Image (cartoon, grey):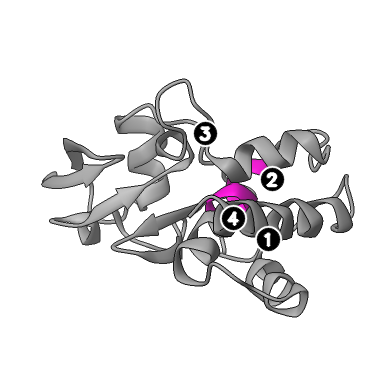
């Protein structure tokens, strides 16, 4: 089997990796690039743990082939913070205690950031709808929703 050479921009940096045709983007991120913050929960696009942003769109990396990343711009959980400075949504998740075991947290954070990039003033219904593809078995969703709404308000106030 031949390997495919893929070049992309990941978290603002040029990246290259080799992959098999059947490898998912999730496989490449975790196994080739050692970006292990993106989690595999279900492998079928149902849980959101593997969420990444590809060319501005929220994507389940378990459903995207790694070869499809050629020339794309990808943001993972590792690229959300600015160095040591947390993104506002990360800070609000901490302040609202919107996490417990943490397994789903990277996917929720990436999804929330994608929402706020697209819509800086979402309603609670819009936040719930946007995050509906992310599953959490520990926290319930209220603290997560409150953290995203609080982030949106703070980001608008600081704009």
Label 3: few (<14), some (14–19) or many (≥20) C-alpha neighbours in 10 Å? some
| Residue 50 x, y percent position in the rendering | 53, 50
Q: Which residue is mark 4?
A: 157
Q: Nearer the viewer, mark 1 or mark 4?
A: 4
Magenta segment includes 107: yes
Q: Is residue 111 above or below residue 4?
A: below
Identified at 33% across, 59% down, the residue is: 54
Closer-to-camera residue (22/115): 115
Q: Residue 20: image x %, image y %?
A: 23, 47
Residue beneath label 3, please? 37
Q: Which residue is mark 1?
A: 134
Find numbered disc 1 in the image and state the secondary structure of the residue it sits on.
loop
In the displayed structure, 135 sits above or below 80; it is below
Q: Secondary structure at mark 3?
A: loop
Mark found first going from the N terminus, 1 or 3: 3
* Magenta stretch encompasses residue 153: no
> With 25 as the anchor, is 9 left or right in this view?
left
Q: Nearer the viewer, residue 72 or 118?
A: 118
Residue drawn at x 82%, y 41% as measured from the top left: 96
Magenta-tinted stretch:
104-110
What residue did someone put label 2 on? 104
C-alpha separation, residue under disc 3 versus residue under disc 2: 10 Å
Check contact, mark 2 vs mark 1: CB within 8 A.
yes
């Amino acid at each position: 089997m031949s390997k495919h050479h893929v070049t992309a921009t990941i978290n603002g940096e040029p990246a290259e990796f080799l992959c098999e045709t059947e490898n998912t983007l999730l496989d490449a991120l975790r196994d080739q690039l050692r970006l292990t913050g993106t989690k595999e929960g279900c492998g079928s696009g149902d849980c959101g743990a593997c969420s990444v942003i590809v060319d501005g769109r929220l994507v389940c990396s378990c459903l995207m082939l790694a070869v499809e990343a050629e020339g794309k711009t990808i943001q993972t959980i590792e690229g959300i913070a600015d160095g040591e400075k947390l993104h506002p949504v990360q800070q609000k998740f901490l302040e609202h205690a919107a996490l417990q075991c943490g397994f789903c947290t990277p996917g929720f954070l990436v999804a929330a950031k994608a929402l706020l990039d697209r819509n800086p003033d979402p309603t609670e219904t819009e936040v719930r709808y946007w995050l509906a593809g992310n599953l959490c078995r520990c926290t319930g969703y209220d603290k997560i929703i409150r953290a995203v709404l609080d982030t949106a308000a703070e980001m608008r106030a600081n704009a």
